[in-house]
Amino acid sequence: MSHWPSTKARKVFRALLRSGWSVKEQIGSSYVQLTHPTKSGFTRAFHDSEEIGPRMLARIAKHTSLKPEDL
């Protein structure tokens, strides 16, 4: 069982910004490329009001080093 809760995409996006990620490029409201000084890039393609499930959050965390307590 995953220890990630389902949460809104805007909450995940804010957590990424707080953890050092910054917006490199934004196209529309849902497609955002993020950069980090020490990690490879990450692309976010969710609308802010969408619910992101535990499995997708685990995949995002794998690429971004996000932790459940960061949310």
Image (cartoon, rainbow, N blue to C red):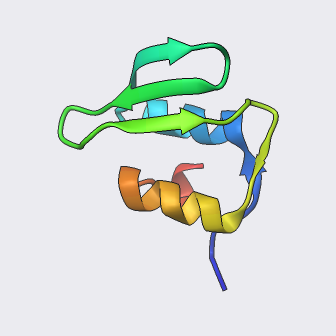
| Residue pictured at 28% horizontal, 33% vertical | 36
Q: On the picture, is 36 further left or further right than 1?
A: left
Would residue 67 be visible to someone looking at this image?
no
Q: On the picture, is 26 further left or further right than 40?
A: right
Task: Tell me where residue 71 appears, x and y as whole percent.
Answer: 60, 49
Tell me if residue 39 comes above or below residue 68 in the rendering: above
Q: On the picture, is 41 further left or further right than 19?
A: left
Residue at the farthest bottom position: 1
Quadrant of the rendered structure where residue 27 is?
A: top right
Tell me if residue 50 comes above or below residue 67 in the rendering: above
Task: Tell me where residue 62 appears, x and y as whole percent.
Answer: 41, 62
Quadrant of the rendered structure where residue 65 is?
A: bottom left
| Residue pictured at 39% horizontal, 39% vertical | 42
Task: Tell me where residue 11 appears, x and y as whole percent.
Answer: 67, 38
| Residue pictured at 66% horizontal, 86% vertical | 1
> In front here: 45 or 51?
45
Residue at the farthest left position: 38
Quadrant of the rendered structure where residue 53 is?
A: bottom right
Q: On the picture, is 22 further left or further right than 11?
A: left
Tell me if residue 66 comes above or below residue 30 in the rendering: below
| Residue pictured at 63% horizontal, 75% vertical | 3
Would residue 21 be visible to someone looking at this image?
yes
How many marks overall?
0
